[in-house]
Image: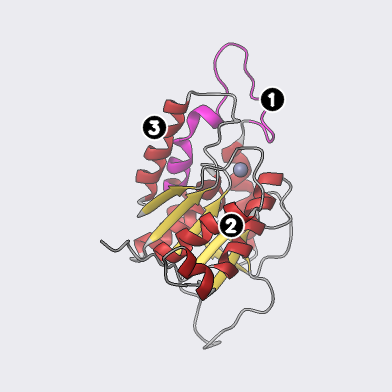
Amino acid sequence: MTDLKLDVLVVAAHPDDAEISVGGTLLRLIDAGAKVGVVDATHGEMGSRGSGATRDAELAAATAAMGLHVRENLDLPDGRVQVTVESRERLAGLLRRYRPDAVVSHHVEDLHPDHQATGRLTREAWFLSGLKRLAQDANQTAHRPRAIYHYLSHTLSAPTFVVDVGEVWERKLAAVRCYSSQLAPEDGGDDGSHFLFGADIEERMTTKARFWGESISARLGEPFLHQGPMPVDDPLRRWLV
Ligand SMILES: [Zn+2]
């Protein structure tokens, strides 16, 4: 049986990163008929809340809320993501298996070391996935996605383009809320203050999205970076996502 061919594959360090960073764009792509998958590098086990079973259930709920076609995990250790020969070949194997046209991951200079490493891991795997000999070693056919983009989590840098996500914003919030054990304070005097960015994730997401939306005369937007100039076939055609 051949695996589903994807249009877009997102590689994220932790479960919830994809929904928080690019959830609106993915919903728009899926609405338009695209096949979209997410690879999480880790299971987010460093999060101090919720059992493994709770996290698995939340991940399944978020995946269903998004309507993702594929969700995979690289099984790398949370808090210790590194670019190694093994981790990049594991990811390159998934790129060959699902053959996406575009791959999307964290900015390579993100504040969080796992995000940074996952961004670099994705760039290296993206290149390696197109090498014939390496593919043969893995009994696969080489495939390098045509495009690679980065999303901005904790890094403020000028994006190459911004996707208008106003119409799907409530659905994105609903998907993010599936991770409630990781993102909301527990009872008993827990004010969420030990979270890196506090428990006000929805307000922070919306503030950022309003900022980037404003930059394209839209209400809410998600920013993306393409390294170097972006090739364009028809400069009169509006970017369709
Ligand atoms: Zn993360």
Viewed as shown, does residue 215 lie left or right of 40? Answer: right
Tell us which disc is closer to us: 2 or 1: 2
Q: Which residue is mark 1?
A: 193
Residue 102 forms part of the magenta stretch: no
**The image quadrant in which ligand 1 is located:** top right
Above or below, comparing residue 64 to residue 221 in the picture:
above
Dot 1: element? loop
Q: Residue furthest top?
A: 188
Q: Nearer the viewer, residue 35 or 44?
A: 44
Q: Which residue is mark 2?
A: 88
Q: Nearer the viewer, mark 3 or mark 2?
A: 2
Measured as percent of width and height from the top left, residue 134 is found at: 53, 68
Residue at left offset 44%, top offset 67%: 100
- 35 w.r.t. 73: above or below: below
Secondary structure, magenta segment, majority class: loop
Q: Quadrant of residue 53?
A: top left
The x, y position of residue 99, in whole percent, is 42, 68
Query: Where does label 3 land, which residue?
Result: 57
Which amino acid type is marked by label 1?
Ser
